[in-house]
Image: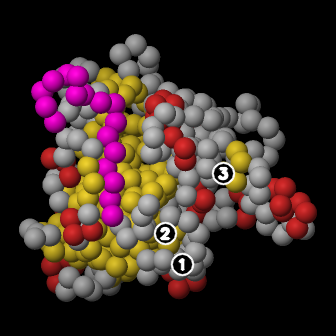
């Protein structure tokens, strides 16, 4: 009971914060991690920035693209009367899912990371997407002769071919990720993932013959290759996957699929047919492609806002560029492949994008009052200006008017 009162108090405080800000005025929100979890392999830190986030009520779920963990923060009131996210709790995916790569089946020194790039919440579950991308070995400080040879090394490894759904249940200190949960009707929902291994999964195998995306599956993500970076899930398992690459002739792509529990294999998901625009079963398909004119940018994240999709865009490859939040109105009504021109994707926000630091990587709605909502932007590769103290970073809260 006490926790419910705290949650309501914090939520009302955030609603007041949203209601008192001008639509163009962002506010910084502190994300505080447990200091004991801040250090990562290869000298990296959790507080270097996050690759994805999803909020529900007073809880914020986050992922770092070089781990096999999901991080949970809870909204709390600060001494000054504001809000921050703290109370860090970590969940190990290896304890929840049967992942294809483990310490016992990869060569020493290989990365087990899932390259998590997308998080969403739907149907009482947390949904996760890895990048599904190929990787080119970095040259670092190698001499030219070795660097040239290294540039030809392309790998598909680790757990990056991951699309998973993990049930949540209430806990004494907030929602928990669990292997399975029994619903009130007696049915059981289990943690499950789309079947696949360390080099592909059911989705990428399906796309091999696709005339648009198939040729890019073997190209590394940073070279305009196939790279999932955005995830949004509608009730019933309708999944939207935003692609950072490829950007084809200036057009970005959002893939749409539908998944359900596998009928015979515990712990697995199965792709199911999407209904076509007509009632004929012959027009049903396993995936749809939506091409978006984002002014040459790729998709960095997706977020459902009612029946609309908010699209975070950014440069598809390394280097400078601009990050924007676009609105795809009534996206859930689309029942066929589509092409959306620039005028159909109005820009709600334009965000700074550094060449090497402070990359907007995630968006999530953290509060709403009428047609005014609070959109949180989460950053990756942060610099000192974006750090909020030891094991802490700043996110930004942008009030948006949704007319």
Cα distance, mark 3 to mark 1? 21 Å
At x 72%, y 64%, the residue is 43
Q: Pointers 2 and 1 in contact (CB under 8 A)?
A: yes
**Relative side of 229 to 259, left or right:** right
Find disc 2 in the rendering and name its residue. 315
Q: Which of marks 2 and 3 is nearer the N terminus?
A: 3
- Can you tell which quarter of the image residue 238 is in? top left
Foreground of the two, 215 or 257: 215
On the image, the x and y values in percent for residue 164 come to 44, 37
Q: Residues within 10 Å of mark 3 (few under 14, many from 20)?
A: some
**Relative side of 94 to 378, left or right:** right
Find disc 3 in the rendering and name its residue. 135
At x 26%, y 21%, the residue is 187
Residue farthest top in this picture? 264
Q: Residues within 10 Å of mark 2 (few under 14, many from 20)?
A: many
- Membership of 174 in magenta stretch: no
Cα distance, mark 2 to mark 1? 7 Å
Is residue 157 visible from the viewing direction of this image? yes
Find disc 1 in the rendering and name its residue. 320
| Residue 133 in the image: above or below residue 236 | below
SS at mark 2? loop
On the image, the x and y values in percent for residue 11 come to 21, 66
- Membership of 281 in magenta stretch: yes
| Residue 113 in the image: above or below residue 387 | above
**Relative side of 154 to 25, left or right:** right
Foreground of the two, 51 or 336: 336
* Magenta region, residue range: 277-293
């Amino acid at each position: 009971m006490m926790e419910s009162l705290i949650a309501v108090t914090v939520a009302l405080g955030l609603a007041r914060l949203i209601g008192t800000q001008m639509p163009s005025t962002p506010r910084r929100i502190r994300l505080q991690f447990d200091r004991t979890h801040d250090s990562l392999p290869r000298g990296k830190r959790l507080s270097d920035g996050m690759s994805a986030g999803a909020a529900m009520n007073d809880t914020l779920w986050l992922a770092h693209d070089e781990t096999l963990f999901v991080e949970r923060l809870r909204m709390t009131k600060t001494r000054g009367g504001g809000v921050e996210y703290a109370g860090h709790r970590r969940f190990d995916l290896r304890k929840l899912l049967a992942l294809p790569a483990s310490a016992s089946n990869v060569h020493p020194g290989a990365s087990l990371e899932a390259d998590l790039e997308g998080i969403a919440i739907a149907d009482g579950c947390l949904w996760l997407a890895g990048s599904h991308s190929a990787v080119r070995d970095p040259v670092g400080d190698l001499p030219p002769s070795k660097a040239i040879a290294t540039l030809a090394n392309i790998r598909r490894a680790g757990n990056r071919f991951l699309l998973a759904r993990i049930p949540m249940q209430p806990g004494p200190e907030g929602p928990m990720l669990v292997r399975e949960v029994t619903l009130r009707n007696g049915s059981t929902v289990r943690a499950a993932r789309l079947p696949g291994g360390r080099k592909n999964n059911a989705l990428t195998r399906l796309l091999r013959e696709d005339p648009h995306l198939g040729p890019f599956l073997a190209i590394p993500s940073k070279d305009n290759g196939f790279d999932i970076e955005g995830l949004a899930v509608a009730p019933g398992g309708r999944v939207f996957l935003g692609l950072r690459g490829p950007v084809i002739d200036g057009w970005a792509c959002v893939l749409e699929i539908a998944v359900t529990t596998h009928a015979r294999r515990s712990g697995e998901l199965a792709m199911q047919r999407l209904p076509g625009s007509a009632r004929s079963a012959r027009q049903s398909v396993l995936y749809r492609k939506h091409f978006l004119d984002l002014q040459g940018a790729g998709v960095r994240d997706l977020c459902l806002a009612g029946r609309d999709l908010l699209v975070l865009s950014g440069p598809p490859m390394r280097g400078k560029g601009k990050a924007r939040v676009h609105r795809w109105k009534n996206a859930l009504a689309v029942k066929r492949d589509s092409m959306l021109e620039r005028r159909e994707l109005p820009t709600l926000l334009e965000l700074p994008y550094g060449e090497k630091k402070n990359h907007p990587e995630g968006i999530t709605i953290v509060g709403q009052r009428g047609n005014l909502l609070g959109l949180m932007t989460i950053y990756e590769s942060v610099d000192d200006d974006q750090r909020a103290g030891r094991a802490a970073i700043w996110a930004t809260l942008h009030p948006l008017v949704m007319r």
